[in-house]
Image (cartoon, rainbow, N blue to C red):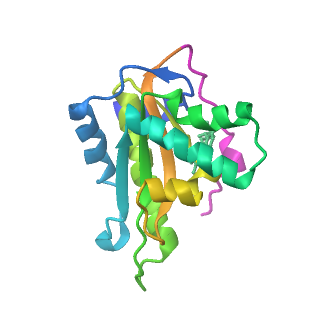
Amino acid sequence: MSDVIQTIQNRVSQPRVGLPAPNREQLDTLFRCAVRAPDHGRMRPWRFVVLTGESLKKLGLAFEQAGIAGDPAADETKRTRWREMPLRAPMIIVSIACIKPNPKVPDWEQVAAVATATQNIQLAATELGFGVMWRTGEMTVAPIVREFLGLAPADQIVAFLYLGTPEGESRAPEFQPLDQCVEFRD
Ligand SMILES: Cc1cc2nc3c(=O)[nH]c(=O)nc-3n(C[C@H](O)[C@H](O)[C@H](O)COP(=O)(O)O)c2cc1C
């Protein structure tokens, strides 16, 4: 079986990752894979922000502020949990869809292109031996998080990709029975 088919089938989300994160050369490889995603109209709707070190702590403060905005009575345990969420990996790549109105390329297609680019990053990172976890949730729409990342009003966060070196055992990949999702017609 070719490497690419094996990598795709074996990839699993890896919630536990540590140092080292991808270096600059490896990141270049990941982003070269990202920008080869199919992209209707060559819109290039993606933007990627790589966060490490202090900027992960700053994202954590933005998460905490966002959490408090939705739950002003939150106790210190909750606040600490929000603040420490981005510290679960040594690197986060934020995948952003920068949507531009286009009568031939609806918004969802631009988000789909960015999701495809994001999956290219996941697969390439897996192939390089890294663990990746695609996370979204309420923080993707929190105004203070959007402001921290400098988003325009039409921009959408597609993923927080938590990346690093896998720690502990990975789960075995699960395969949905194909007859649940595939049909053949002659
Ligand atoms: C758009 C999108 C959003 C996701 N958001 C989350 C998330 O917020 N938290 C999480 O644990 N996993 C998230 N995931 C990862 C899925 O949970 C994961 O891919 C799924 O459980 C299958 O596991 P596997 O990737 O190991 O096969 C997301 C995946 C996608 C495509």
Could you tell me which residue is drawn at 72 percent across and 54 percent down?
70
Could you tell me which residue is drawn at 26 percent across and 29 percent down?
23
Residue numbers of the magenta segment? 168-186
Classify 127 as above or below 116. Answer: above
Classify 161 as above or below 152. Answer: above
Q: Quadrant of residue 39?
A: bottom left
Pinpoint residue 138: horizontal percent, then vertical percent. 65, 52
Can residue 166 be spotted in the picture? yes
Could you tell me which residue is drawn at 53 percent across and 41 percent down?
61
Q: Nearer the viewer, residue 19 or 123?
A: 19
- Given the current orientation, which residue lies at the most extreme bottom position? 103
Pinpoint residue 32: horizontal percent, then vertical percent. 25, 46
Q: Nearer the viewer, residue 100 or 66?
A: 66
- Given the current orientation, which residue lies at the most extreme left position? 25
Q: Nearer the viewer, residue 56 or 165?
A: 56
Give left or right: position of 51 versus 59: left
* Residue 122 counted in the magenta span: no
Which quadrant does ligand 1 occupy?
Answer: top right
Could you tell me which residue is drawn at 35 percent across and 42 percent down?
50
Magenta stretch, main secondary structure class: loop
Give left or right: position of 45 versus 159: left
